[in-house]
Image (cartoon, rainbow, N blue to C red):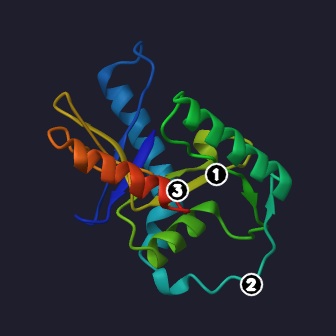
Amino acid sequence: TILAFSHVDGVWWAAGVVEATLSQPDRERAVRHSAERLLRQFAPKHAEPASLREPAARRASSNFTRRGYCAAVARALDYIAAGDIYQVNLAQRLTVPWDESPARLYLRLRQESHAAFGAFLGPGLLGNEQALCSISPELFLHVCNGVVTTRPIKGTRPRGLRAKARDEAARRDLEQSAKE
């Protein structure tokens, strides 16, 4: 079951996959039951943003050492230079002690960030009492009516398909940028 909240429209929606052997009413009941369980976890907390108290300072631990992360960046740059890839999302797992529900962390992120895109995958979906919270200003991929749109922010520039000089200027700009 997937539960989503539209921050634009202010409404929740749910969708789910159930066994095809169930009757249509039983399928609807099963999805409704899962959605209601998820809503109990999220919706009441969403309605009470003031109750999200300031968390205590916490120390995060990473699955990378500084040296390991720098080595991974160097390897990614080698792949880019070889032309094997053009963009890398080099992620690291940061683990932070958190006494509240993962949903409260996600809602806190949504409260603090004005990023347009986000997702929450809770323990019910991931298992092992793990959750994934994602907040991003970047539209990675959108598909609508067979049209694919991507709007990456980092490491890209628009192509000047009819203006070779524009492509060359964009290439130089990327090469000279320490960030990109």
Of labels 1 and 2, earlier in sequence is: 2
Residue type at tag 1: Ala
Q: Residue at x 68, y 70 (%)?
A: 100
SS at circle 2: loop
Q: CA distance from mark 2 to mark 3?
A: 21 Å
State the mark number for residue 131.
1
**Residue 160: percent from the left, percent from the top?**
21, 44
Closer to viewer: mark 2 or mark 3: 3
Residue nearer the viewer, 170 or 156? 170
What residue would you read off at disc 3?
A: 134
Q: Residue at x 56, y 81 (%)?
A: 52
Q: Kindly indicate whether the residue at mark 2 contacts the one at mark 1 (C-beta within 8 angstroms).
A: no
**Left or right: 89 as drawn, with respect to 68:** left
Q: CA distance from mark 1 to mark 2?
A: 20 Å
Q: CA distance from mark 1 to mark 3?
A: 10 Å
What residue would you read off at disc 2?
A: 56
SS at circle 3: strand
Residue type at tag 2: Ala
Residue type at tag 3: Ser
Locate residue 164: give its quadrant. top left
